[in-house]
Image: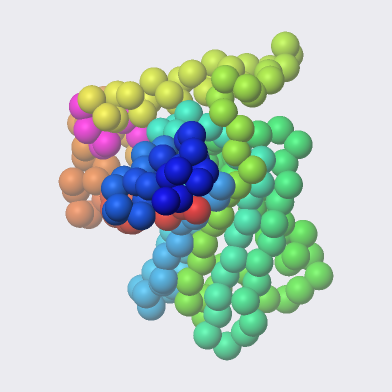
Amino acid sequence: MLRKVFGGVVGNYWYYRLHFKEVDLYTSGYKRMSAMRSLSAKTRSSYDTLHSMLISLCTRLEQRLVKQDAFCREISFYASYYDAPEWKTSIKLLHPVQDGIEMLNHIKHRFNEHEKYHTLKILRKDISSMGVVIGDFILAKDVQYSLFDNKIQMDKLRKVMYHIKDQYGKNTIRKASETIEAGQMKDAIGFGSVKDLYQNEKNAGYNKFLLEEDKEMGS
């Protein structure tokens, strides 16, 4: 009866819907993506491990953006504590980003602004969980580049890097920023290989959090 009353596309839609047939075969893009972790006592024990966890969250979001061939123009960070209220911040970006370290630097800039006027650090031992959320996406083909920087080459290189990871394994190639200590890269070229960074248990220079697999969360 509804099929006759409505007619056309609308009538067919409700006919198939009421007869339990699949009609929603389209997919819509994410409006937001998030990565979060609950933190163990061992992870909370030092600033270096907390910083490494934050790098891993930003890197995971970078991976998803590359997979979606997209950039983001909004970054949010939140931290929950056992003995203090939640701290969070939201950042609107003038230029869209895809790189995880760029996201990290924007978040750390907000940390520095807050910590100028407060005695407590954001990354401290009573933190129970942290998360990074990105949104306001733009497709890579719509990103406008300046004639006076090399971001287009960097973005192309990032895409090639993840293509190599997909083809030969995620540990085939890594960025120096993915080591556990910022600014320090273990020399694994002259007498070894990149795999030494994560296969040697005595080597504490590698950010092991990056090896974790998590459930992708989007909305």
**Image coordinates for residue 69, horizontal then vertical, percent:** 48, 29
Residue appearing at x 52%, y 44% in the figure:
6
Note whether residue 112 is visible.
yes
Residue 204, above or below 167: below
Q: Does residue 142 show up magenta in the picture?
A: no
Residue 66 lies left or right of residue 169; in this view the side is right
Q: Does residue 174 show up magenta in the picture?
A: yes
**Image coordinates for residue 191, horizontal then vertical, percent:** 21, 29
- Colour option used: rainbow
Q: Residue furthest top?
A: 147
Q: Quadrant of residue 110?
A: bottom right
Residue appearing at x 48%, y 34% in the figure:
8
Residue appearing at x 81%, y 70% in the figure:
117
Q: Quadrant of residue 24?
A: top left
Residue 143 lies left or right of residue 119; in this view the side is left
Give the overall secondary structure of the magenta segment: loop
**Observer-nearest of 142 and 38:** 142
Note whether residue 63 is visible.
no
Query: In the rendered structure, which segment of residues is drawn in magenta?
Result: 168-175
Q: Residue furthest bottom?
A: 83
Residue appearing at x 42%, y 51% in the figure:
1
Residue 203, above or below 49: above
